[in-house]
Structure formats: C-alpha cells, structure tokens
Image (cartoon, helix red, strand yellow):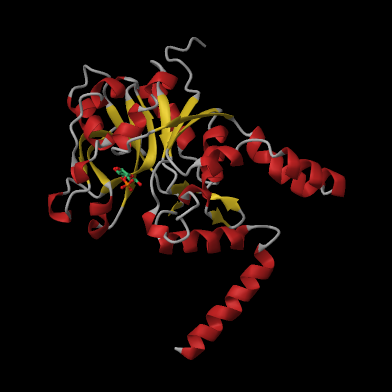
Amino acid sequence: MTQSHPRITKAVIPAAGLGTRFLPATKATPKEMLPVVDKPAIQYVVEEAVTAGLDDVLMVTGRNKRPLEDHFDRNYELESALEKKGDGERLAKVQESSDLATMHYVRQGDPRGLGHAVLCAAPHVGREPFAVLLGDDLIDPRDPLLQRMIDVQEGYGGSVVALMEVAPEQIHLYGCAAVEGTGDSDVVKVTGLVEKPEAAEAPSNYAIIGRYVLDPHIFDILRTTEPGRGGEIQLTDALQQLAEDEEVGGPVHGVVFKGRRYDTGDRGDYLRAIVRLACEREDLGPDFRAWLQRYVAEEMQRS
Ligand code: G1P
C-alpha cells in the first residue's frame, strides 16, 4: 500500500506547568511525578504514546523538572543493588521506564502558555504531523484514543483533536468546539473553537481533552498567535485559525471519545483515578476492593 502521508512517530508532552493545585506536594516535585497507584502519572502518558506507535517523545519541561529526565533514564546504582539482591521483579520495574521510548527534552524557559510550549517543539518535530499529549489527562489504556486519532488524521488529513461531551457547567474548564457530523459516527468536523467559554457562550458541550494530532502548519500560526485567555498563547486559538482557513494546513476534525478519562490535575479526580486503577490491578485489587467495600459500608452506616 502506498502511503500518502508520512507515518506519525513523534509525540510532544508539555510538562512545564507549576502544579499549584497540588501544593505543597509539588513544591519540590514535578506534578507529573505524583504516583497514580505506584507509577508516576507521566509514565502512563508516555506508555500511551508508545502503544500508539509513537516512540520518539519530546518533553517540554521547565525549572525543577529534572526528576522527569531521571525517571526515564537508567539508574545504575539502584539497578545493581537490585541485581545483587536477585530482585528481578523490581529490577524490571526500574528498567521499564528507561526502555520505553527515545526521550528528548527541551526547556520552555519562559512559560507563556500551551501554544508556546507546543511551539518550543518545532525544531525537533520539523514538517511532519505529530501528536501532543497533555499530562493532566489520563486515558484508560483499555480505551485506545490516540491510535484512532492517528487513523483519522491519516484518512482526513489536517489536524485532529480529542473531544468529550461534558455537562454545560463544566465547559468553562476546557477548549470548546463547534462541530458538524461526518460519515464516521465517532468523527466530527470542527468548524470553530473557543478556549474556556462561559456556558452561555459555548458553541456546544464538546470539550477538548488533552490529545491532539497536529499538522505542522500549526507552528507557522503559533509564531504569530497573540496571547489569548489568561494572557497566554493558546493552542486552541491557533487551531481555530486552522479550522477557519482550510487552505493553510486544515481541516480540523474531532474524535469523540466515550471511554474512561481521568483528570489527574484535579485533586478529586486524581483520587478517583487511583481508587479505580487500584481496584482493577491483579496484584492489589482483590484486597483493596474488599477493604473498600467494608469502608463504604461503615461510612453508609455512620451517615
Ligand atoms: C488545556 C487546553 C484546553 C483543553 C485542556 C484539556 O487547558 O488549553 O483547551 O481543553 O487543556 O485538559 P488547561 O487544562 O491546561 O488549562
């Protein structure tokens, strides 16, 4: 089969945020390193990229983010200590993250918003379509989204965003898309985008969740995108331009996701993600579920 599009191999993960919602835990530790059960949140995101065939990963980091680089690097001291003890199981866990992908890092320096973070990836990405995965959004590995988005990008061209229907009172937390149907039941054409609108002004209840497959023309647009909401250079604003002017790197489509997504940037959702994923783990799940049932029963009696 002749391929008309270059195969997508690069993933960009913006990780320069300050994580203020998790202070004091994030005073000296990047929020991306907070554990979800026993793995840092960021490892789930890198694993997701790799599962979708993207094994060239660029992290856009900032100050205080050294632990991220260390996590995806070898740790010879720890490895040899575990080897000496004959603890193969834990050794495998330590080596897993350094064997995952080819990791690259670039510093954002002056964090001026998500659009600016993506623009920092331009020299590494070049002129190929690429994926962006936001670390705060955790997509359950059983509900593959990124692979579907890549397929849709290969079919329709242009850029693809992940969309999820949310309650109207939630839309002000997200980028919001005006959409039209297509021949594919899970694909919509995006006709307009607005970053974090008030419910009354929102064109729909389709929220952008943190997965994008982008045409490289986005870089040309980001170079001249003015600061938008919150005084930041918004990726949503640059995508709006792509959606508006299809001649330049458009169109923009959305894959409507109906699977399980956890917002690990929100403390409540973060706790729910841990409980759900712990319940489903083969090693921890049976004991944890039994305890949880007892705990909930006791709580119900008390109230
Ligand atoms: C960013 C984007 C927003 C998107 C959201 C998804 O916002 O700007 O359009 O809906 O991620 O998580 P943030 O949550 O970083 O403020």
Image quadrant in which you'd find residue 181: top left
Q: Note whether residue 188 is visible.
A: no
Answer with left or right where residue 202 lies relative to residue 20: left
Q: Is residue 281 above or below residue 302?
A: above
Q: Is residue 67 above or below residue 267?
A: above
Q: Note whether residue 50 is visible.
A: yes
Q: Position of residue 155 (x, y in %)?
A: 39, 22
User: Residue at point 55% right, 46% down?
Assistant: 142
Answer with left or right where residue 94 lies relative to residue 228: right
Which of the four quarters of the rendered structure image does ligand 1 lie in? Answer: top left
Image quadrant in which you'd find residue 176: top left
Observer-nearest of 248 and 17: 17
Observer-nearest of 34 and 198: 34
Observer-nearest of 156 and 75: 75
Q: Position of residue 127 (x, y in %)?
A: 38, 15
User: Residue at point 50% right, 89% down?
Assistant: 301
Q: Is residue 216 above or below residue 143?
A: above
Q: Position of residue 288 (x, y in %)?
A: 64, 69
Residue with the most extreme left position: 201
Q: Position of residue 28 (x, y in %)?
A: 49, 53
Q: Is residue 143 above or below residue 191?
A: below
Residue with the most extreme bottom position: 302
Answer with left or right where residue 137 lies relative to residue 225: right
**Number of marks present in the image shown:** 0
Image quarter of the C terminus = bottom left
